Image (cartoon, grey):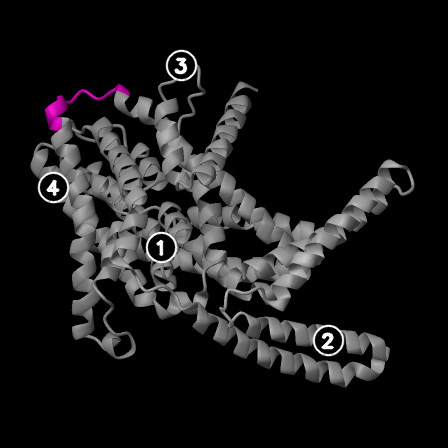
Amino acid sequence: MESLFEVVVVLAVATLGAALARKLGVLAPILLVVLGLALSFVPGFPHVRLDPDLVLVGILPPLLYVAALETSVPAFRLNLRPILLLAIGLVIFTAFAVGVVVHLLLPGVPFAACLALGAVVAPPDAVAATAVARRIGLPRRVVTLLEGESLLNDATALVLLRVATIATLGTSVGVGDVAREVLVATGGGILVGAAGVLVFGYLHKRISDPLLDNAVSLIVPFAVVFAAEEIHASGVVAVVVTGLGIGHRMPLLMSAASRLQIGAFWRLARFLLEGLVFLLVGLQLREVVRDLNEPFGFLVAITAAVLATVVLTRFAWLFPVTYLTRLVSRARQRDPAPLAKFPVVLGWAGMRGVVTLAAALALPLTLAQERPYPRQLFVWLAFAVIVVTLVAQGATLPAVARRLRLPPDDPVADALSAAGVQQQASHAARERLDALADTAPKAVVDRLRRGLEERTNLAWERLGGTGRETPSHAYGRLRQEMIDAEREVFRAARDAGRIPEEVLVRAYRDLDLEESLLRQEKKS
């Protein structure tokens, strides 16, 4: 009961922190980490120890799954080359660079152990980068690259960490062993993920009850991870493949009611899990610093060296990869080199998060041989990288993006494309309606034609951009007032005993759905 109370308290604080961040206009991940740092030393506040298994199996899979569900597969495929260069090449490059630097500063520590630390701090966080990028409105392609990188880089880092840990424990690791580990982890993850698409896609298609669809959706990431772990494959890759496949086919697999309910559920789940994750990271400070024995000056020096390596290697990789690869490939023909400001923003968006800390806490307590191994120092270094990159880079990323004046996505081009497709969709709908017109009363057919015409006009209205209220917005404003009036009449009738509660619930449900649609149209 006490542990349940602690979880409720931490969730409540995370929710309040996220609400405060919105009120202050601050990025929630940054505020929650700072809040956790402060609360870690408050006497009596629940001390929730971060369990690596809980993070890697309980928290990361659902967050990756919902991110993959919302990722555009065509955009992901179109940007596959730069995504893989970031998610695989940059992670390996950063891990070896950090390993070399730490080994130079700690020559008595085996290089394999230093490489393990490099693998721990190499991958940017799957939550932090995209949360910040979407919040500040970065261009769509930058967000796609950051999302794609964050979906796959954890798999690269965890495989590299596994290999380095095996070598650290004294087992001889050759090129063949590494290749086999990569093949099993990646290939097995892809196979399990593809199987997840087939199995759970079939279940979603057979299920008509939105509640059951929602329950299956909740089970998917955990089932896929456990299946991958059973064959020692990468659970991260499996979850991402399953999420991409089901998300791409979702309109064909689920009813509209299921999609709406699943979307609402995963928004809530992501909100709670992200808040919990960042708060928990900050709350670990007291435990991380408790057993540190290194001299203060040396601690500052090695921390600064690792931080500088983590930040600079990202830029050192991005600029050559962005421009030199186009000189030796056909990429420049279909994808011209971007302005230098784009790799600058991508480079500054390398925030680390909870996976880094979980991987650090999962490092072995001792080595097989009696060799020096400052595990607690490694945990501190990982923690420092998380806090500094998340707070410093995350807080300044909006200013960097504004200063560089990245060209935003063209809303007129988006609206023009949407209007063109809506025109085609309306034509198809009109043909279908004409073919079925004899099966319904004329008044019903005329009403459907008017609604179709209104949706087409709404798509073209978005191209106006004059600043004046469009007819559709005027309709939404007046209809909202009408809904409020209707809702009040139903409530008064229920209170007076003229209608039962069930009638009120049904009426509210219909009015709520219409109001939700009005709000969505207003946002778009």
The residues tagged by marks 2 and 1 sit, at their Cα atoms, a distance apart of 47 Å
Question: Counting other residues with Cα less than 10 Å from the Cα at mark 2, is it few (<14), some (14-19), or many (20 or more)?
Answer: few
Q: Residue at x 21, y 43 (%)?
A: 118
In the image, residue 463 above or below residue 267: below
330 relative to 286, above or below = below
Name which residue type carries label 3.
Pro
Labels 1, 3: front one = 3
* Callout 4 secondary element: helix
Quadrant of the rendered image containing residue 179? bottom left
CA distance for labels 4 and 2:
69 Å
Q: Nearer the viewer, residue 34 or 21?
A: 21
Give the alpha-carbon distance from disc 3 to disc 2, as whole Å.
65 Å
**N-terminal of the two: label 2 or label 1?**
1
The residue pinned by badge 3 equals: 43
Residue position marked by numbered label 1 in the rendering: 152
Residue annotated with mark 4 = 101
Residue 202: x and y, percent? 61, 62
Q: Compare marks 1 and 4 and give the one earlier in the sequence.
A: 4
Q: Amino acid at mark 2?
A: Arg
Horizontally, residue 254 falls left or right of residue 26, namely right
Amino acid marked by disc 4: Val
From the image, tell me which residue sits under label 2: 450
Looking at marks 3 and 2 on the same chain, the residue that comes earlier in the sequence is marked by 3
The C terminus sits in image quarter:
bottom right
